Image: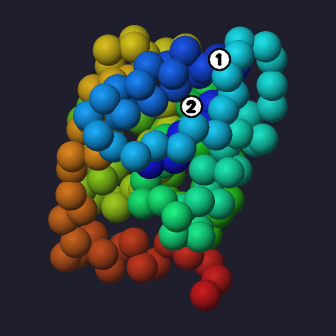
Amino acid sequence: VRIGSDHAGCATKERITDWLKAVGICVRDHGTHAADSVDYPDFIHPVGEDIDSGEADFGIAICGSGNGAAMVANKHPGVRCALCWNAELAELARRHNDANVLSIPARFVSMELAMEMVRVFLETAFEGGRHQRRIDKIPLCG
């Protein structure tokens, strides 16, 4: 799992990273590591690059609203990033959309809810079937 955040998501990112390591999931933290104001693309693009290159299967992108992080992540052709604000959306993003990056709006969800979304996202399998046909229609090139 690759993870990145801006200053608004730093505390959430740190907590998620610690939990992932504690449960034995290999995680690479692309930063930021402080509450000082930063530009979210600098920390989300590396997450997308790791998905594109095949170095990682899943990513987590965190910013204040989750919108900017999702927009940046979705610029990468191999990324299907879903902005989620509850566990049901995280589950559906995986099950129906084969999302491989979860975007979390740190200023709008509790720490507990963020953790639950990550757990559900990583534990949920893609259903395939009719959903695969739809996934195949997402890319504009290639």
Callout 1: few (<14), some (14-19), or many (20+) C-alpha neighbours within 10 Å? Answer: many
Q: CA distance from mark 1 to mark 2?
A: 8 Å
Mark number for residue 62?
Answer: 2
Q: Is residue 111 visible?
A: yes
Q: Looking at the picture, how far across and down is residue 62, in whole percent?
A: 56, 31
Q: Is residue 67 visible?
A: no
Q: Is residue 71 above or below residue 136?
A: above
Quarter of the image for residue 90 reads top left
56 to the left or right of 125: right
Picture colour scheme: rainbow
**Residue at (40%, 12%) from the top-left corner?**
110
Quarter of the image for residue 121 reads top left
Mark number for residue 110?
Answer: none
Q: Is residue 35 above or below residue 127?
A: above
Q: Nearer the viewer, residue 54 or 110?
A: 54
**Residue at (32%, 14%) from the top-left corner?**
112
**Residue at (34%, 50%) from the top-left corner?**
93
Amino acid carrying mark 2 in the image? Ile
Q: Is label 2 in a helix, a strand or a loop?
A: strand
Cβ atoms under marks 1 and 2 closer than 8 Å: yes
Q: Is residue 142 above or below residue 116?
A: below
For the view shown, which residue lies furthest in the bottom direction? 142
Q: Which residue is mark 1?
A: 8
> In the picture, which quadrant includes the C terminus?
bottom right
Q: Is label 1 in a helix, a strand or a loop?
A: helix
Quarter of the image for residue 75 reads bottom right
Amino acid carrying mark 1 in the image? Ala
